[in-house]
Image (spheres, grey):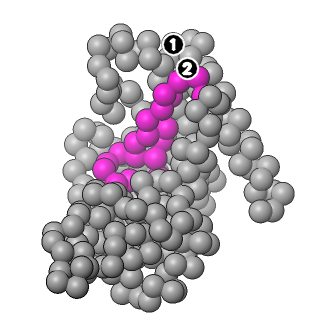
Amino acid sequence: MKDSQTKEIKLLEKRFTELSRLAYQRDIITYSDFLNLSEQNILHTLPKDTLYSRYVSFGGYELAERQMAAFITDALYLCYGKKELSPEEIGYPFRAVRVAPLNRRFSEELTHRDYLGAILNLGIERAKIGDILPMDGDALVFVHDDMTGFIQEQLVRVRHTSVTVSEVPLGEVRYTPSFEEIKGTVASVRLDSLLPLAFSSSRSRLSGLIEGGKVYVNGRLITSNGYQVRDDDVISVRGMGKFRYKGALSRTKKNRTYVVIHKYV
């Protein structure tokens, strides 16, 4: 690992510890910026005695890749009288905005890269932007509270398409990723057995992705080919996509496992 990467990891670990300490000392909820999968993994793998509080993360909808962590003390859970708090109760400091063409007749077919490029060109840090979901000619974008008004005022064009930006209440966000259901047999419910089924490629090629630090299970980096996947685990592979392991259906006569997965498209 390069020295610069090690330094970035140490700084992020320190930041998480500080947020947790602040939450504990003041009995308040503190929040990170939006975290990518690598940053979430750093948080997940911190030694338990490093943090002063619990944390949960959310990105605006189930299966969000970029998520914001909230550090919450036990005292606040007791105050609410609950073991779990809803995203509304936690009050994550981000909002959803819809980016739509001013005139659909003259709009281009815009991609995730187009929307992200237009937003970053405004000078906004990537950490202030969550997932970007292109859909039906529009895009739903999750944005830190600090930047919402700025984007609404300043984002007027994506590529050559004039756009308008309007806020969508988080409680009204209804987004369910489309998926393809895939059924097949595997020798075992190991990570290196499921990847070839999901991505229609050879086991030897895909096992290199695992060892190369490209595969995450529920936001945690997994580098062991033999990792045992559990029902409803979400597996993300950088550059290839993600899928949810739904479980085993039966055993074949050759003692292979017949499984079903949902590959998100």
Mark 2 belongs to which amino acid? Ala
Instruction: Residue at 44%, 17% (x, y): give it.
Output: 74
Camera-side residue of 167 and 128: 128
Camera-side residue of 187 and 75: 187
Instruction: Residue at 42%, 54% (x, y): give it.
Output: 218
Read off the residue under disc 2.
23
Is residue 161 shown to the viewer in this render? no
Please provide percent x and percent y for residue 166: 34, 48
- Helix, strand or loop at disc 2? helix
Please provide percent x and percent y for residue 14: 71, 35
Specify the segment rendered in magenta. 51-71
| Disc 1: CA contacts within 10 A as few (<14), some (14-19) or many (>=20) | some
The residue furthest right is 3
Where does the C terminus fall, quadrant-wise? bottom left
> Can you tell which mark lies on residue 219?
none
Camera-side residue of 106 and 80: 80
Q: Is residue 152 left or right of residue 35?
A: left
* Magenta segment includes 62: yes
Res. 81 image quadrant:
top left
Please provide percent x and percent y for residue 183: 20, 78
As displayed, is residue 155 above or below residue 226? above
Read off the residue under disc 1.
27
* C-beta proximity under 8 Å, tags 1 and 2: yes
* C-alpha span from label 1 to label 2: 5 Å
Is residue 91 shown to the viewer in this render? yes
Instruction: Residue at 59%, 67% (x, y): give it.
Output: 213
Where does the N terminus fall, quadrant-wise? bottom right
Please provide percent x and percent y for residue 55: 48, 32
Res. 15 image quadrant:
top right
Q: Is residue 257 left or right of residue 53?
A: left
* Magenta segment includes 99: no
